[in-house]
Image (spheres, helix red, strand yellow):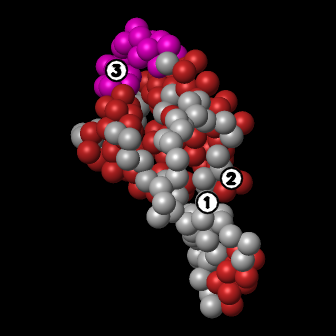
Amino acid sequence: MAAPSAEERALLERGVRAVLSGWAALQLAVAQGFGGPQSPEKAAWLVGALLEFLSQNPELTEDEVEDFLAEVMDNEFDTAVEDGSLRQVSRELLSVVTRAREGDVGGVGEALAALARRGPALASALANARSGHAPDPAPDHGPVPDHAPQSSGSSSEEEEEAMECGTPPTAPDGWTLVRRRRR
């Protein structure tokens, strides 16, 4: 396949940037630093990597694009995307690629406009994520069942004993904190 023209490449880049900027899973991974302190740089790199991938492989299927995105999210952002957005994003990317290859400036513009319309909802969700507030607080499910662990005065003794034997201490709410191993 011939290299894309400058106009096609510019259309494709605008489309890829728009699709990725509207992808909540990626934006949350960047906002929350799932890729470490270099998360924004990794997101910028993904735009270039996707442009290269889409340009060099003219006969891509949704599954191949989905697999590529899933691998990048897993490897670069330690994130397994299980909300169905991988399929949607791969479909949107392939639509933009097809329109850009056909030189359909209006079609790419329509796709960008559709992505821009969902921007305010994404911005709101990202603002909530950055501030650490959940958009809807969890409802109160009534009293704690009798079999739930109750806090007692000996919790510091239990914590100390747990630390000595190498098991993580149980938090007062009954949950056990599991820490990630260093690589």
Residue 173 marker: 1
- Is 57 left, or right, of 45 in this rendering? left
Assess whether residue 107 is covered by the magenta stretch.
Answer: yes
**Residue 2 seen from this side:** no
Say which label, 1 or 2, has the lower sequence index: 2
Assess whether residue 102 is covered by the magenta stretch.
Answer: yes
The location of residue 138, given as percent across then percent down, is 54, 37
Residue at mark 1 to residue at mark 2: CA–CA distance: 34 Å
Residue in view at x 61 percent, y 60 percent = 173
Tell me the SS state at disc 1: loop
**Magenta range:** 94-117
The location of residue 51, given as percent across then percent down, is 46, 39
- Is 95 left, or right, of 175 in this rendering? left
Q: Image height check: is 72 above or below 8?
A: below
Residue 99 marker: 3
Quarter of image, res 40: top right
